[in-house]
Structure formats: structure tokens, C-alpha cells
């Protein structure tokens, strides 16, 4: 399962979630503004840009097209 880290009112977060829904990719969403532990984890990993995705314990963040390719693998 893919874990997706998002923030409210984030257009790129919405785009990634929409892509995963239409591609029938299962994911679990975590809002980093509501989940302090998730926020702290990403901060520790020096990840500040949302969305971020976690697959098999590895966290990815960056360009939305790259993230789409990563979650499609």
C-alpha cells in the first residue's frame, strides 16, 4: 500500500490523489497538518514539499509527474 502525505488546499496533492483514484492505485492518505508524527517524520527526512509518498519504507517527494511515475510502478 502506498502512503500519501498531503496538506489541505494543495493543488498538487489533489492532482496526485485524483491520478491514483483514476488509475485504481490503492493508497492511504495522511494530512501532515493534522498528524504531528507524520509531519515530524517528514521534517526529519528534510521533506518540505507536498505531496510526498511512501512506498516500502522509502519516502519520495518532488515533481508531480515523477511521483505519478513512482506510484505507477
Image: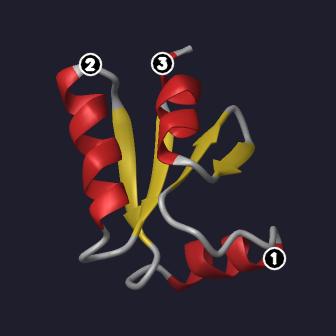
Give the structural element (helix, strand or loop) at label 1: helix
Residue visible at 21% across and 40% down in the picture: 18
Q: Nearer the viewer, mark 1 or mark 2?
A: 2
Q: Nearer the viewer, residue 66 or 26?
A: 66
Horizontal arrangement in the rendering, residue 31 relative to residue 66 (left or right): left
Asked if marks 3 and 1 touch (Cβ < 8 Å), the reply is no
Give the structural element (helix, strand or loop) at label 3: helix
Q: Is residue 25 above or below residue 36?
A: above
Q: Which residue is mark 1?
A: 44
Residue 13 x/y as whole percent: 35, 57
Of the two numbered discs 1 and 2 on the same chain, state the one appearing first in sequence: 2
Residue visible at 38% across and 83% down in the picture: 34
How far apart are the alpha carbons under marks 1 and 2?
31 Å
Q: Residues within 10 Å of mark 2 (few under 14, many from 20)?
A: few
Check the image and name the residue furthest to the top.
Answer: 73
Q: Which residue is mark 3?
A: 72
Give the structural element (helix, strand or loop) at label 2: loop
Residue 23, numbered label:
2
Residue visible at 81% across and 76% down in the picture: 44
Of the two numbered discs 3 and 1 on the same chain, state the one appearing first in sequence: 1
Q: Residues within 10 Å of mark 1 (few under 14, many from 20)?
A: few
Q: Quadrant of residue 10?
A: bottom left
Asked if marks 3 and 2 touch (Cβ < 8 Å), the reply is yes
Residue 5 x/y as whole percent: 48, 60
Residue visible at 56% across and 14% down in the picture: 73
Horizontal arrangement in the rendering, residue 47 relative to residue 25 (left or right): right
Amino acid at each position: 500500500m502506498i502512503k500519501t502525505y498531503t496538506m489541505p488546499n494543495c493543488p498538487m496533492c489533489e492532482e496526485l490523489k485524483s491520478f491514483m483514484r483514476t488509475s485504481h492505485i490503492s493508497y492511504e492518505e495522511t494530512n501532515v497538518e493534522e498528524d504531528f508524527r507524520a509531519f515530524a517524520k517528514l521534517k526529519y527526512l528534510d521533506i518540505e514539499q507536498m505531496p510526498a509518498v511512501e512506498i516500502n519504507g522509502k519516502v519520495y517527494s518532488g515533481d508531480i509527474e515523477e511521483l505519478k511515475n513512482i506510484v505507477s510502478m
